[in-house]
Amino acid sequence: MTIYFPNKNDEWYTLPYAVEPILEFLKPNSNILCPFDTKDSEYVNVLMNAGHNVTYRHIKEGSDFFDLEDKDVLLFDYIISNPPYSLRKQVFNKLEELNKPFAMLVPLVSIALKPIREKLQDKQLLLFDKRIKFKSEEGMICKNPPSETAYICKNILPKQIIFKELKYT
């Protein structure tokens, strides 16, 4: 097992309003893997409430995303989450290796990372009209995130770039 220890700044939680925009692009009753999430994750909650079957994993519970093998993801239609910021490059390398449809909420500048940039023609972007706010482990909302975020997807969106209006709740 390749246990990694994320940077202390990697644990920022996605709020429900930032998960909801991806729902319209998913097949009903999909099997979804949320590889960086606990049972309390808004990804898990929003996706389950929308009728999807969700499996969640988190390094704090001993589940290392980087140990996943092709056979582990055969049952899943999608891999969806907000990955650890400090490990974005490695996450996208692993996603390419697993070759499953995915949606990862990451800073928009991530498109310049080599594993994304080199295969940009295969990627899709779900962009937003506002910056997404995140919540800390202590429950504090980051009111002015340092960068724009977007979903970088593969085989989920109907076209390469989609722009959505966020509805804060």
Image (tube, rainbow, N blue to C red):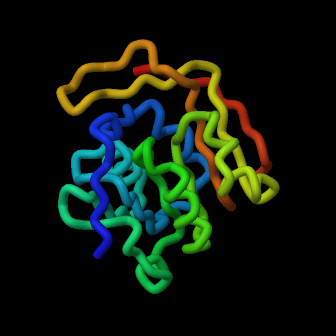
In which quadrant of the rendered view does residue 58 lie?
A: bottom left
Residue positioned 29% across, 45% down in the render: 41
Q: Position of residue 68 (x, y in %)?
A: 40, 75
Residue positioned 36% across, 19% down in the render: 142
Please say if 125 is above or below 95. above
In which quadrant of the rendered view does residue 27 lie?
A: bottom right
Q: How many marks?
A: 0
Q: Position of residue 132 (x, y in %)?
A: 49, 25
The quarter of the image holding the C terminus is: top left
- Left or right: 127, with 106 as reference point: right
| Residue 126 vs residue 144, the one in the foreground | 144
- Left or right: 58, with 88 as reference point: left
Q: Position of residue 64 (x, y in %)?
A: 32, 66
Q: Position of residue 110 (x, y in %)?
A: 61, 41
The quarter of the image holding the N terminus is: bottom left
| Residue 95 vs residue 47, the one in the foreground | 95
- Left or right: 16, with 74 as reference point: left
Residue positioned 57% across, 63% down in the render: 93
